[in-house]
Image (cartoon, helix red, strand yellow):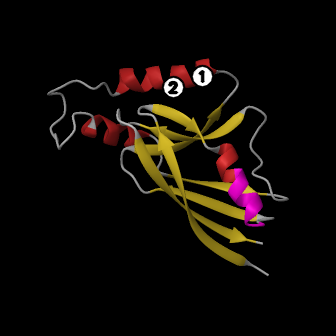
Amino acid sequence: MMKQDFFDLEIETSGKSLVDISNLVQIEVTQRGFQAGLLTIWSTHTGASLLVQANADQDVVADIEAFFEDLVPMRPGKFRHKPEEADNAPSHLRALLTQTQISVPVEHGKMPLGKVQSLYLFEHRQANKTRRLRMHFLGE
């Protein structure tokens, strides 16, 4: 019988960083008894995004962070929208260039990530944040 489940996952970040959430998501898949289907993960924030990326070594993460620093620098006066925090506009633009939702298949109770793949929450803000991910599972 097909089932559908909605739930939230809260992630604490330490400012700008890539947080490997693969194990946290897999724990939820296991505890909820999901066997086969599709898990969609939605970030409810405009200053963070989601990625599936290599986890072979920390240099991969450092390269991604350096790439985004070059691409969308935090440069006072560069961007027009300047709400309460200086990193607001750059964080929104970084999220625009990535994705705020991702779908991952579940097979035999597991997310079939590649040998050197991880699921990351990409925090674009400088301050520590608590991020809420809205999850939707459809399957059995």
Q: Quadrant of the C terminus?
A: bottom right
> What amino acid is found at the position of numbered circle 1 in the picture?
Val
Residue 60, numbered label: 1
Main secondary-structure element of the magenta-colored stretch: helix
Looking at this rendering, what residue extends furthest in the right direction? 108
Q: Position of residue 49 (x, y in %)?
A: 46, 44
Q: Is residue 52 magenta?
A: no
Counting other residues with Cα less than 10 Å from the Cα at mark 1, is it few (<14), some (14-19), or many (20 or more)?
few
Q: Position of residue 13 (x, y in %)?
A: 47, 39
Q: Position of residue 118 (x, y in %)?
A: 67, 38
Magenta span of residues:
26-33
Q: Residue at x 47, y 25 (%)?
A: 65
Residue 64, numbered label: 2
Looking at this rendering, what residue extends furthest in the bottom direction? 1
Q: Quadrant of the N terminus?
A: bottom right
> What amino acid is found at the position of numbered circle 2 in the picture?
Ile
Q: Position of residue 48 (x, y in %)?
A: 42, 44
